[in-house]
Image: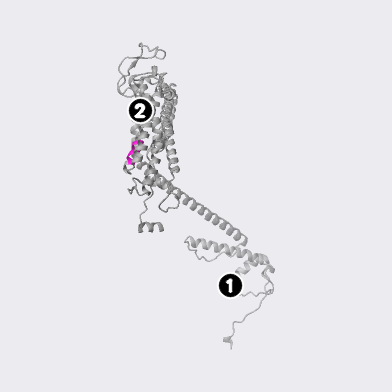
Amino acid sequence: MDLMRSEPMQLVQIIIPIESAHLTVSYLGDLGLLQFKDLNADKSPFQRTYANQIKRCGEMARKLRFFREQMTKADISPSAMPITQTDIDLDDLEVKLGELEAELIEVNSNGEKLQRTFNELLEYKLVLQKKLGDIMEMTFGGRYVIMMMAIFSIYTGLIYNEFFSVPFELFGQSAYACRDPSCRGATTEGLIKVRPAYPFGVDPKWHGTRSELPFLNSLKMKMSILLGVAQMNLGIVLSYFNAKFFRNNLNIWYQFVPQLIFLNSLFGYLSLLIIVKWCTGSKADLYHVMIYMFLSPTDDLGENQLFPGQKTLQLVLLLLALISVPWMLFPKPILLKKQHQERHQGQSYTMLQSTEELLELDHGHSSHGHGNEEFEFSEVFVHQLIHTIEFVLGAVSNTASYLRLWALSLAHSELSSVFYEKVLLLAWGFNNIIILIIGFIVFVFATVGVLLVMETLSAFLHALRLHWVEFQNKFYEGDGYKFSPFSFALLAEDED
């Protein structure tokens, strides 16, 4: 029967002082031969005297589990080391575990911040690379535009015979010289012409003279008008090819022809006067000629006459300009109404000559669409009236808009002159190498930043505006629609 019984047990009572309780329990735990019996089983954990110590131990156990989780996440295997130190101070252990936990939390927080910063930098890098790629792609796509801008910049420098506001006599000697070797009267009495006219561009002697700005202003303003009238005429000519392509005879005879006559009767005539004045060296006042062409067309021109028969020519051109306005306004709506009536009365079964005529007729139809629609003549006439007014007023405003070329050229030349004279030459006058270096650096940065970057962008935007508004409104309509074919591949892309 003794084999079926447990080992003999003894119930003992041990009274342990608080100071040695931790060490005693540690020894008993190492011994492993003693079982504790709870004599206060009827009390809750919060009523026990050692509840706070249990809470502290539970908190330290949580911290140890947290350390183990972090070590597992970092692929670090915890080493199982036997505990040889028995006199462990619980307070010191609690403080140490708290410090380690705070450090580990800070490390995790810094790691997360570093990861977020890395992700942001990576995103910035990808965005920057994409932008640089877009810029390079845009630059590559506009390489021919940039090349043409560079070529025309060089050509303009040759025309004015200047390089960064420094004049040079590349194509020979100037046609003007001083009256005496000392050149004392150059600024008061002026120069005298001793040679034929300069073979190419503006004579370099104009640079730095009192009359340079008035002369170049007049030259640039007239060149702007010539370029503007030429480009607007090109736009009107392109409208003829549009009408011819769509087989629209109405637009050829009642839009292209009167527009060409109106523009050239006024501003084409002004361009002719500019060229004649340049060729003859006349001192005629072109402002006076153009103003009194409208106010007093029958008065004598006097000293403003550039060639024989000019007065008669002005009267003819003025009459043509006045005739071209009703020419653009009345015939086209009337003929569209007549075509509509013939088409619905069975007198004509021909197809519409153009898509534009069909659209204009559709504007005149009622919204019922039962095959015998009414032609809204008032809508078509108002549309044509607006188009005529836009062209007549636009011919004046668009020509004036091309004077922005004069303003841009003037601003560019004056900025270049200021940078050269007030920065580079001023620094050169101090006879100090340090000031000269600083002045040269300022001159280079000002030239690159303002003249080569800002001025280039400004000239590009203004030229783009002239192409879009003043040039393309003469022929561009944009009445088409996007081609959307039936395609299973496109359907799949849309679903994706």
40 or 165: nearer the viewer: 165
Q: Residue at x 45, y 42 (%)?
A: 378
Quadrant of the frame with the N terminus:
bottom right
| Mark 2 to mark 1 CA distance (whole Å) | 104 Å
349 or 76: nearer the viewer: 349
Q: Is residue 399 above or below residue 105?
A: above
The quadrant holding residue 145 is: top left
Return the mark for residue 31.
1
x and y percentages locating residue 419 in the rendered image? 43, 27
Q: Is residue 463 above or below residue 94?
A: above
Residue that numbered label 2 is attached to: 157
**Boundaries of the magenta span:** 236-243
15 or 212: nearer the viewer: 212
Estimate how packed mark 2 is, as few (under 14), some (14 to 19) or many (20 or more) residues with alpha carbons within 10 Å: some
Quadrant of the frame with the C terminus:
bottom left
Q: Which kind of residue does numbered mark 1 sit on?
A: Leu
Q: Main secondary structure of the magenta part?
A: helix
- Residue 471 is covered by the magenta coloring: no
Q: Which kind of residue does numbered mark 2 sit on?
A: Gly
The quadrant holding residue 413 is: top left
x and y percentages locating residue 129 in the rendered image? 41, 47
Under tag 1, what secondary structure?
Answer: helix
Estimate how packed mark 1 is, as few (under 14), some (14 to 19) or many (20 or more) residues with alpha carbons within 10 Å: few
- Give the mark toward the camera: 2 or 1: 2
x and y percentages locating residue 300 in the rendered image? 40, 18
28 left or right of 158? right
117 or 149: nearer the viewer: 149
x and y percentages locating residue 387 in the rendered image? 42, 38
